[in-house]
Amino acid sequence: MLFAALGFGPRARKGDRGTVGELNDAVLKIQDYLLRTSERLDNILGTLKNHRELLEKMSRRVYQTGTRERIRLELDIMKTTASVLALNGVELDEGVLAEIDKLKATTAKEDTDILALRRLKEKLDKRFDGEVGKFDLTAIYKTRNRQIAGYR
């Protein structure tokens, strides 16, 4: 009866593995999985913390800087947005990217007129919004989300 409860056959020998051994293996696998998962979660939480700190620094920087630096930050955001869209298969006009780089170089020059810089930035905003507006971003991301495991 003891052999049956442990999952051993009638001819069990020393060293045979029964139900207890299988359960022990399953528990060890679960422990390994949980350890790996906890390490991944630690990495994710650390990354989120770093990202939050970066955003806080950027917010402080935006409040403390002038128009020239704000335009530079907005151009960085536009460039990052274009990169993310490119990763998802959206191709923007090459001229928009070149114009972003050109305007960013212009903001680095101290002798540039702020009003002219604002006008150029507004013109670029309209062009960028027009380029991005050509695509149905919701449909693009819905199809991509289905391919990402664990993402709804």
Image (cartoon, rainbow, N blue to C red):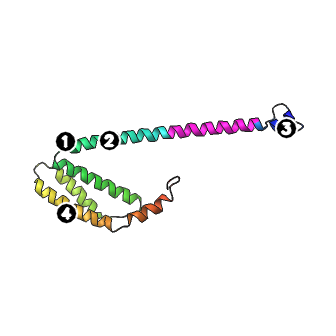
Q: Callout 2: helix, strand or loop? A: helix
Q: Callout 4: helix, strand or loop? A: helix
Question: Between marks 3 and 2, how big is the CA–CA gap?
Answer: 61 Å
Please name the predominant secondary structure of the magenta segment in the image.
helix
* Location of mark 2 (residue): 54
Does residue 14 appear to the left or right of 101 in the view shown? right
Residue 21: say if magenta: yes
The stretch of residues the image draws in magenta is 20-40
Return the residue found at the far bottom: 134
Q: Position of residue 32 (x, y in %)?
A: 60, 37
Q: Earlier in the sequence, mark 3 or mark 2?
A: 3
Tell me the kind of residue under disc 3.
Answer: Ala
* Location of mark 3 (residue): 4
* Location of mark 1 (residue): 64
Q: Residues within 10 Å of mark 3 (few under 14, many from 20)?
A: few
Quarter placement of the N terminus: top right
Question: Between marks 2 and 4, how big is the CA–CA gap?
Answer: 29 Å
* Location of mark 4 (residue): 123
